[in-house]
Image (tube, coloured by chain):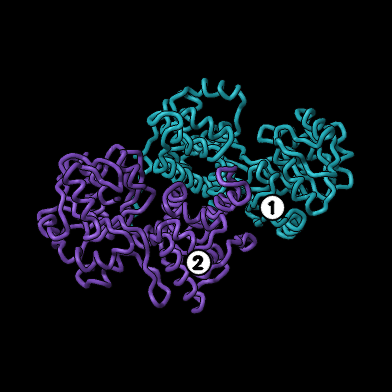
Chain colours: A purple, B cyan
Amino acid sequence: MMGSAMSFPLRDNGHEVRLVGTHLDREIIQSIKAEGLHPTLKRKLPEGIDCFQIEHLEQAISGADTVVGGVSSFGVEWFAANVLPVIPEGIPLLSVTKGMQNESDGSLISYPRLYCQLLPRASEMCLNAVGGPCTSYELADRDQTEICFCGKDIRKLRQLKNIFETTYYHISLSEDVEGVECAVAMKNAYALGVTLAVGLSERRNGIGGRLNYNSQAALFAQGLKEMRNLLKLVGGRDENILWGAGDLYVTVFGGRTRLIGTLLGRGMSFKDAMSELSGITLESVVIAGRTADAVRTLIKRGRASEADYPLLLHIDDIIRHDAEVDIPWSKFETEIVL
Amino acid sequence: MMGSAMSFPLRDNGHEVRLVGTHLDREIIQSIKAEGLHPTLKRKLPEGIDCFQIEHLEQAISGADTVVGGVSSFGVEWFAANVLPVIPEGIPLLSVTKGMQNESDGSLISYPRLYCQLLPRASEMCLNAVGGPCTSYELADRDQTEICFCGKDIRKLRQLKNIFETTYYHISLSEDVEGVECAVAMKNAYALGVTLAVGLSERRNGIGGRLNYNSQAALFAQGLKEMRNLLKLVGGRDENILWGAGDLYVTVFGGRTRLIGTLLGRGMSFKDAMSELSGITLESVVIAGRTADAVRTLIKRGRASEADYPLLLHIDDIIRHDAEVDIPWSKFETEIVL
């Protein structure tokens, strides 16, 4: 969906766009070919896009100036094995996938760095990524959006900005790839955390009843605090927390992450909440689990403190250990002595 | 309203509470005396509160362990002249008023510091303040709330925490008074900024139509960025941005600041928006103006950069110079080179 939505700024800037679906996207590609409609994005894509099924990937990439990668977190290994090798030397990749991978020593690494581990040639490639608050629906509606392109080379980033920037798609640039990617990866996990308060309000006031914002705000601030601690762990620059904050804000307001946080907050078990969502595994759940695994490993190694991640660890206990929702409010308290 | 709401944790902890209204609160005090109802908070206050009109201030304060100050930004001079002198030596003040005062050289100072300027004796007093996301309605409903008490002496803060903390009112402590107060003062100005996007959505999609969250999130993140710059200006610790973020989140969701931001975003002139609000001057408007004045003075003095405050300066142009809403999106863009 986000990959397809990127066709709006590209076509508005007069670029040729070739859209390739994975093996899971056959019907989407057929629908766009037949009537221009992206069935899950629920929008007509711009005129003049060439569509390709996965078998014609090489043909689609041939002659392209830039490749946009639009798989979800679940597709990164597939992407590294099947798409990266086909990208010609010197052609930049811009990936919209948000997430981090945890390693056995507790390190959290960005997907661009993961690609370099999965495919030796990738470290020679120009790998870039997009972070910041952007839903695909709103990008497709040309609503005002402010995001960040990150990559190792500011000159390449400026070229990419030149290709994508429009009057509604505003682009900051950063060479701090791990920092930007860490900040925006975590929003999925913590958006689940913030929306627990929505479900807790419903448990108290009835569904459709009054929502409580003090508690949402407290969880929002605690989420940012823990995201800031994670940023330190990966060596990212602190100001990236602003991308995380924007991304957390937009994620709290919609979609399935809000739904599952709300259901859990109401008191539903994780198993039952998942069946309400037709068993679809959410990126938020996976990212929360991975990050909790990383943090638990680092705690064991004496490299992180349990006191710095009470919300993350509680989210993980809820979704993987059937814990009841019981927000550890007093663990959020801090004391600053000058 | 917030001062009265503080009676909930106090009474729940078994403390004696004496509630004093200013000369503007006569009817509120009468209503609480007569039927226990706070007419603007729209809640019955806890049982067992003694109510006093302003003439009996000294009687009310006599023998108190702690004084809670609950005036708005417009009442701080009155408070310094009429209440501070009556507080006996050694009795701590906890003020819920959020805001900053700008000085002629462009400095922004907290209200505790302003009190010390207005009343020489105040610098000998134990002045403390509350920051962080808390609406009075939700505190009165005993909803989960996490805030920060700030003051110069951590031991006094710990005593105050002991008095106020309940199972729903969670208290962090900080000796960084200017930092906490600056972070939470600015939320009023920037909440107006974020909700411009609500009005812009309504202008585009109709009132009651679809809201755009990419743009709200972009303004939220830009607001935090500028609040972080202001924090640096006042010498506050950077982590206070978390209190600002929580406070901004809760302020975006309700009340008159959201309403005026929305009306302005729809395209209404500031004058017309103010008449919709029956001409009541909002703290958000005053704080935005004061902060913009401070920043413009510091820019003239070469101590601040215009590029660091594009959203604040635009808000000020809208509310004081009849500028049309035209969010300076491209001025929000940044470039980070490692």
Same chain shared by disc 2 and disc 1: no
Is A177 displayed left or right of A313 in the figure? left
**Mark 2 packing: few (<14 Cα in 10 Å), some, or many (20+)?**
many
Choose mark 2 or mark 1, whichever is in front: 2
Q: Return the x and y of residue B294 as percentages of the image width and height.
A: 54, 36
Q: How far apart in space, not on screen, are marks 2 and 1 (Cα)?
A: 36 Å
Q: Residues within 10 Å of mark 1 (few under 14, many from 20)?
A: many
Residue closer to the observer: B114 or A219: A219
From the image, tell me which residue sits under label 2.
A316
Q: Is residue B179 visible?
A: no
Q: Residue at x 79, y 44 (%)?
A: B46
How far across and down, in percent of the image, does residue B194 sit?
47, 39
Residue in the picture at 62% in, 40% down: B99
Element type at mark 1: strand
Q: Chain of mark 1?
A: B
* Foreground pick, A237 / B283: B283
Residue B207, placed above or below residue A311? above
Which numbered circle lies on residue A133? none
From what the image shows, is residue A215 above or below residue B40? Answer: below
Answer with left or right where residue B130 lies relative to residue A12. Answer: right
| x 15%, y 53%: residue | A52
